[in-house]
Amino acid sequence: MNAPNSSIDLDAYFERIGYDGPREASLDTLAALHRLHPQTIPFENLDALLGRPVRLDPQSIQQKLVGARRGGYCFEHNLLFRGALDALGFTTRSLAARVVWGRTDPQMPARTHMLLLVDLEGVTYLADVGFGGVTLTAPLVFETGRDQVTPHEPFRIDAIDANNYLLQVKLDDTWAPLYRFDLEPQFDIDYELANHFVATHPQSIFVSNLLVARVAAHSRYAMFNRRLTVYGPDPSQRELTTVDALRDVLQNEIGIRLPDDANPALDAMLARLP
């Protein structure tokens, strides 16, 4: 459980995500925020690619994702989301996960992802607005073995054993694993350590590749380096061969307000993408 966070500017956050509903700790409020947040605040790792620090204090996160209309990755998204929920009176718990999405390496990965549990009226929900191209768009009832419909794909929480769980998504009639986690509480310092690895370690995928995503009403946009893929009713894929094309997609299709103070470095970084 986290102490209520009074540092977040709820008015600014709600304006950012386009929410104008009730300010009460209800399932309807949780579901609405969970749907709107990933539709308007993109997933992106530009700062890590630019060699800039990724700061996790509430003021820095709010300035970047809300004030500057940027995006971020899991720690930034879910800390901001947690701050809003706590300010509204929800009871949240912070956890960490080991990402197995797309992995072929048999070694156990580190805990480099943040997720939340929300306790509401005797029911626990899994909430996560920061998992890139397959980010949840609705909270999930924390119940194992249950297929759960969301505004996008179905998801399911499975029990690995008595202490560990696996989140899966259904893609083309196949269940794909996203991450495994347990219920050990995580504190903000735990995320600081994981964030340092994700943002600076040479083995981190985030320091050498562009990863960007945004959810739309019925589709998903995902960028990996120069490749833009749109998933949904009208799927497409294209390669972005120029810096101008990359900038255009990042700003106009993904919705990132690119940092003006990094223009030369940003263009150089985009030009180097594989």
Image: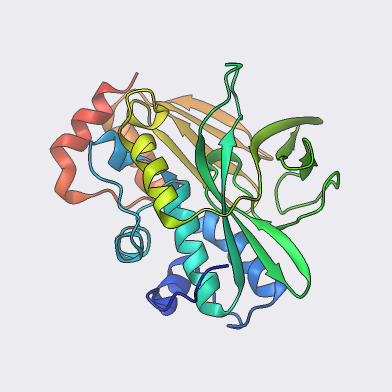
Judged left or right of residue 158, residue 193 is left
User: For residue 188, what is the image quadrant?
Assistant: bottom left
Q: Nearer the viewer, residue 216 or 112?
A: 112
- Give percent across and percent down for residue 233: 69, 40
- Give percent across and percent down for residue 72: 40, 49
Vertically, is 80 above or below 194?
below
- Give percent across and percent down for residue 66: 37, 64
How many labels were placed on the picture? 0
- Give percent across and percent down for residue 34: 61, 61
Q: Residue at x 29, y 61 (%)?
A: 60
Q: Residue at x 48, y 26 (%)?
A: 238
Image quadrant in which the N terminus is located: bottom right
User: For residue 9, what is the image quadrant?
Assistant: bottom left
Q: Residue at x 35, y 54 (%)?
A: 70
Q: Residue at x 51, y 64 (%)?
A: 82
Image quadrant in which the C terminus is located: top left
Judged left or right of residue 45, residue 260 is left
Residue 41: in sight, yes or no? Answer: no
Q: Nearer the viewer, residue 188 or 234?
A: 188
Vertically, is 22 above or below 1?
below
Vertically, is 128 above or below 213?
below
Q: Nearer the viewer, residue 78 or 2?
A: 2
Judged left or right of residue 247, residue 8 is right
